[in-house]
Structures are given as structure tokens and as C-alpha cells.
Image: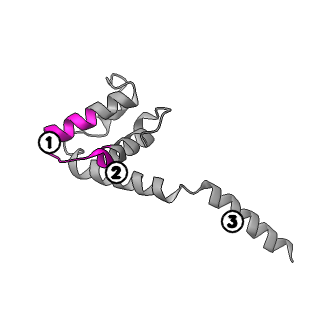
Amino acid sequence: MSINFFTGLLAALFLATLAPEPALAENFQRGQELYGNHCQACHANLVHLSKNRKVNSLSELRKRVTSWATHAGENWGDSEVDDVLFYLNRTFYHFKEEPL
């Protein structure tokens, strides 16, 4: 077999390790869609980037998302809240613990 074959194989294996797990990609996309459709009208992304933000842990963020979903009349279960948390944490907060 040629060197090009092995080089291609190694490149494919390397790229496969960088790809997110399908479930994580789905959670992120669903969270992004839920946030975009139900939250972003009132919450510009700047609220999450502010140095004066009042959310300092994933559990606090979960309480906020759950509270605002209820306040907005959304009938979100744990799955929707978890997906929005996953999106917000990966995009803005970067808390070490994962919501899922």
C-alpha cells in the first residue's frame, strides 16, 4: 500500500477524533434553536458576555433558565432545559461541569 493511503487513513482517524459525538451535536443544535426561538428576543448575547453577570455556576444557570422558561410560559421539561444549558455553557459560560 502506498504512503498516500496511510497518510489519508491517519488524517481521517485524526479528524474523526475532533468531531463531536452525534448526541452532543444534537444537544447543542437543539439548545441553540430553543434559545434563538424563545430567549434571544429579550436576551441579547451581551447579557452572557458581561463581566458583571450574576451567574457563577451551572446550577445557578439552570435555575435561571428554568425560571425564565416558566415566566415566559414555556412548557419545558428537563430535556429542553438541559439542551439550552449545554448550548449556553459551551458558547458563553464554559463552566467545567457539563449539564448532561
The foreground one among 14 and 67 is 67
Mark 2 or 3, nearer chain start: 3
Amino acid found under the numbered disc labelled 2: Gln
Q: Is residue 19 left or right of residue 41?
A: right
In x, y percent, where is residue 93?
A: 42, 34
**Number of numbered callouts drawn:** 3
| Quadrant in which the N terminus appears | bottom right
C-alpha span from label 2 to label 3 = 28 Å
The foreground one among 73 and 90 is 73
Magenta region's main secondary structure? helix
Residue 36 vs 44, above or below: the answer is below
Instruction: Please give the residue where the numbered disc 1 appears in the rendered image.
Output: 72
Instruction: Please give the residue where the numbered disc 3 appears in the rendered image.
Output: 12
To which quarter of the image does residue 67 belong?
Answer: top left
Residue 2 vs 54, above or below: the answer is below
What secondary structure is found at the residue carrying circle 1?
Answer: loop
Q: Nearer the viewer, mark 2 or mark 1?
A: 1
Label number found at residue 32: 2
Amino acid found under the numbered disc labelled 3: Ala
Tell me which segment is drawn in magenta: 64-81
Q: Is residue 65 left or right of residue 8?
A: left
C-alpha span from label 3 to label 1 = 45 Å
